[in-house]
Image: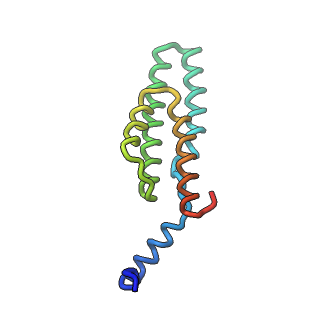
Amino acid sequence: MSTDEYRRGRAVERERKKRNRAVSGRYRGVIPVIYGIGLIIFLGASLFIGPESAFAVYLVTHLFYAGLIRGDIKSLRKQDIDWGFSRHAWFGAALTLPFVAPAYYLYSRRVIHRENQSRGVVD
C-alpha cells in the first residue's frame, strides 16, 4: 500500500490536477508591449522635450518594468517554479538597466517551456 491511499480526497486530487496544468506567466505577455510604448515615449521625450523629462520617463518606466517582473515571478512561484536568489537580481536589474525587460521576457520563456516539458504539458 502506498501512503497516498490514506490521503485520498479533494486535496490530493486538486494537487494532482495542479501539477499537470501548464505554467504561464501572468504579466509576461504584456512586457514587450509596455517596453515598446515606453521606448517610444522615451525617444519622443528626449528628442522634443529635453533630457530632464527623458530621465523622468526612464525612471517611471523602469519602476513599472520592475513591478511587472516582480508580479510575474510571484505568479510563477505560485505555480511551483523555484527562482531562488535570481528573482532578486531580476528585480534589481529591472530598476536600473535598460534592456532587462526584453532579457527577462526571453529568459522566462525558456524557464516556462522547460517546466512545461517536465510536467508533460504542451505550451
Q: Where is residue 17 in the image (x, y as percent from the top left)?
A: 50, 71
Determine whether 26 is above or below 11 in the image.
Answer: above
Residue lying at the far right of the rendered structure: 122
Q: Position of residue 6 (x, y in %)?
A: 36, 85
Q: Quadrant of the N terminus?
A: bottom left
Task: Please give the name of the residue rendered at 59% of the width and 32% of the height, measured from the top-left corner.
Answer: 37
Figure quadrant of residue 49: top right
Q: In which quarter of the image is the C terminus?
A: bottom right
Q: How many labels does the image show?
A: 0
88 or 42, nearer to the observer: 88
- Colouring mode (rainbow / by chain / secondary structure / one colour): rainbow
Task: Please give the name of the residue rendered at 46% of the width and 53% of the height, measured from the top-left corner.
Answer: 76
Task: Please give the name of the residue rendered at 59% of the width and 20% of the height, measured from the top-left corner.
Answer: 44
18 or 60, nearer to the observer: 18
Task: Please give the name of the residue rendered at 42% of the width and 57% of the height, measured from the top-left corner.
Answer: 78
Determine whether 59 is above or below 34 in the image.
Answer: above
Figure quadrant of residue 91: top left
Residue lying at the far front of the rendered structure: 1
Determine whether 28 is above or below 22 in the image.
Answer: above
Q: Where is residue 82 in the image (x, y as percent from the top left)?
A: 41, 52
23 or 65, nearer to the observer: 23
119 or 66, nearer to the observer: 119
The answer to whether residue 92 is left or right of residue 48 is left
Figure quadrant of residue 41: top right
Q: Position of residue 116 (x, y in %)?
A: 56, 58
